[in-house]
Amino acid sequence: MTGVTHTLKTVMAQQFRGSRPVKGGKNSKSRSKRGKRKLSKRQRAIYRRRRIVVGVALVVSLALVVFCVYSLSRGFAAIGTVIRHDEVYAISRDSVPEPNSVKKSGITDCSAKDLTLQLTAASQSVGVGGTMQFTAGMVYEGSGSCLVDGSDSNRVLTITSGNETIYRSDVCEVDARMLLMAKGDKDSQKIDWNTNANATLTECTDEDTWAKVNPGTYVAQLSLKDNPKVKSEQVVFTVQ
């Protein structure tokens, strides 16, 4: 009996030793728990801020790309508009006929009744031997397009003193300056008068040989050579 009991104890002891956990199993579970540990609130906040910063940077970068593409497209469009404008302007200038071909162009001359002349002086007085600058304007008030010569030979500046004509801008002929006018168009040109006299000349000579006028009161006025009845208002000034 005693032998049997001893034998049973021996068998149970062997089974107990065989059922013990393998060395290191507890440490593996601990490491597994440490790998799955939860983040603290502070760490989650840091990660959240990082994600926000990255997202904002991406949005800004995308916006910059879109802006650059838009700016480039607008720039190319503006360049194309300027080029087209220059081409149209060049074509419009080329379409104005030369004086010799006016009759062949089919474009009529501007009627005198549709033209208004304007004249202003830069100052009310000028010294003997000095220069008085005028601004000559021509406005078209007709309904259709027409041609007019805007040169100093056709839009004539006349300066008088009393009943005497002192100066005319058409004594020396210049090339015609044909203008294609439409309703409301205005042409403005500067005219310099060097306080000299040329009205008594029968032909154009060197301006340096023209006599200077004497001090006094003078009157300037514009008129159309082809229709002298079309005149500007008179401009009175003095030569001192």
Image (spheres, grey):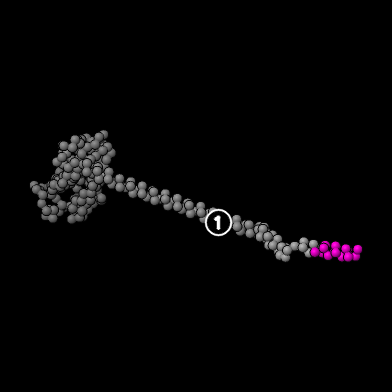
The image shows residue 79 at horizontal and vertical percentages of 33, 49
Name the one closer to the observer, 63 or 124.
63
The image shows residue 218 at horizontal and vertical percentages of 19, 48
The image shows residue 152 at horizontal and vertical percentages of 18, 46
User: Vertically, is 228 above or below 122?
Assistant: above
The magenta segment is 1-14
Local crowd size for mark 1, using a 10 Å CA cut-off: few (<14), some (14–19), many (≥20): few
On the question of residue 88 being in view, the answer is yes
Query: What residue occupies the far left of the structure in this picture?
Result: 202
Name the one closer to the observer, 47 or 35.
35
Amino acid beneath label 1: Val
Q: Dividing the image into 4 quarters, which one contains the C terminus?
A: bottom left
Label 1: element kind: helix
User: Vertically, is 177 above or below 36?
Assistant: above
Identified at 22% across, 53% down, the residue is 126
* Total marks in image: 1
Identified at 24% across, 36% down, the residue is 145
Identified at 51% across, 55% down, the residue is 57
Name the one closer to the observer, 184 or 93.
93
Name the one closer to the observer, 74 or 200.
74
- Quarter of the image holding residue 91? top left
| Residue picked out by circle 1 | 53
**Is residue 10 covered in magenta?**
yes
User: Vertically, is 228 above or below 72?
Assistant: above
Q: Dividing the image into 4 quarters, which one contains the N terminus?
A: bottom right
Chief secondary structure of the magenta span?
helix
On the question of residue 112 being in view, the answer is no
The image shows residue 207 at horizontal and vertical percentages of 13, 53
In the displayed structure image, the side of residue 67 where residue 194 appears, left or right: left
